[in-house]
Image (tube, rainbow, N blue to C red):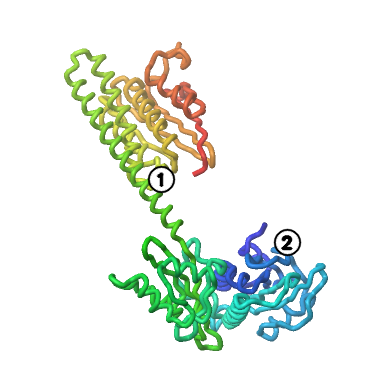
Amino acid sequence: MPTLSDLVVKHSALDAADLEWMHSLVSDWQLLADLSFADLILWIPGRDGWIAVAQMRPTTGPTVYHDDVVGSVVAKGERPLIETAWNERRICREGDPDWSTGVPVREETIPVRRSLEGDFIAVIQRSTNLSSARTPSRLELTYLQSASDLAQMVSEGRFPFAEAEPMLVRSPRVGDGLLRLDRAGRVTYASPNALSAYRRLGLHADLVGSELGKTTAELCYRDEPINEDLMLVASGKAPRETEVEKGGTVVQLRAIPLIVGGGRIGALVLVRDVTELRRRERELLTKDATIREIHHRVKNNLQTVAALLRLQARRMRMPEGREALEEAVRRVGSIAIVHETLAQMPEELVEFDDIADRVIQMTAEVSVTPAMVRRVGSFGILPAAVATPIAMVLTELLQNAVEHGFAHQTGKVEVLVSRDQDLLEVVVADEGRGLPDDFDLEVSANLGLQIVRTLVVGELSGRLGIAPRPEGGTEVSLSIPVSPA
């Protein structure tokens, strides 16, 4: 399905500022749909007629459009209400209910203006399913009045709020709880959900008639400084969000000032009890901190093991034994590098390029053979379950290339990396003396190559290939499946 941006660029001459305003509008117009109990469709004037570029269904009532209409084009003159709203720059509510779909639908249109001094750029079609119409309750009347005020703000270029701070990932919705304030910040209506949230904060009196800012401050900030955002939000003077906490209960507040005809007539405050959500977030933070601490301690223990092996290697008189212990030190060190990186990451994902560079540096530092090792390409982000074996594989291959490939002569080793969405390919190429004529990976007695084969083929379900290079030297190729980062 084409995006809003695609449709605007393809069918209209609207500029980047117009498009940004529409993005802001549709990111927050669920509020208008829910207050209106109505479907919303955003139409823009195009070269071929009117184009539907966005659509929103209400969560508070039945929908009119079960199918998506985004991308639909209607010729000029086919939708008189859209034409009237656009030409006369006003909200259009004329006309009888439309029965063409089998259910009565009330159609309204709202011209969309970009900012107070900006141009009109689109029209919102608001369609209400009247099949379940009944005598409205106090809640529904408050919703509809608030929707009317918000629609007027859209037509005047006052909503969405250009100066508003970015909203939280999950802002409160109309159904979570709604308070209507007058111009002085007093509550004129409190929905049952909003009242319940304040009951959990410790409120025993009625909210209606009280000053929301003062009442909230007395509930939550008796013995500590008041959150500076609280009074702005709870009084409805600024389009912001904040949270208040009392006795383990956490309530999220979002203010929508209502400014109609140039004056502030009041505000809507959306209320949501996020106690359980915040409790789970704290548990996850504690769990993440514990996991990072475990990785830190594992790294310390591995470094201790490596130090002990290094001490033992220095006391070893047999060259073969000393070499074996030094190889073990390098293997333990490569694993420690992964755990050190994981100890600093919030998730079990690592930026592997840094690990690869440290493994390369470690290989160059401990090698008795002068060699230049460089990496070309990026490993990207890898999960810990993949990063640890790849670090060990890289250590073994570089060590083999430097020590066995050059035979005490200087040389160059390249680590060539390429990666698409789900496949990592690595080539370790050296310009050394090459492979023996009778080399066979399947029967090779080299411990390092056996480790590489076990990790790549057995643990990572990848492919391993070793072959001589035409220009001299050896080329080891790895092909490893990885999950998208």
Residue in front for this viewpoint, 34 or 374: 34
Which element carries disc 2, helix, strand or loop?
loop
| CB contact under 8 Å: marks 2 and 1 | no
For the residues marked 2 and 1, what is the alpha-carbon distance in whole angstroms? 40 Å
**Residue 184 appearing in the image:** yes
Residue type beneath disc 2: His
The earlier-in-sequence mark between 2 and 1 is: 2
Mark 1 surroundings: few (<14), some (14-19) or many (≥20) residues within 10 A: some
- Please name which of the two marks, 2 or 1, marks the residue nearer to the observer: 2
Q: Is residue 248 left or right of residue 464?
A: left
Q: Which residue is mark 2?
A: 66
Query: Splitting the image into 4 quarters, where does residue 416 fall?
Result: top left
User: Horizontal and vertical percent for residue 374?
Assistant: 36, 36
Q: Which residue is mark 1?
A: 347
Q: Residue at x 66, y 70 (%)?
A: 40
User: Horizontal and vertical percent for residue 445?
Assistant: 40, 13
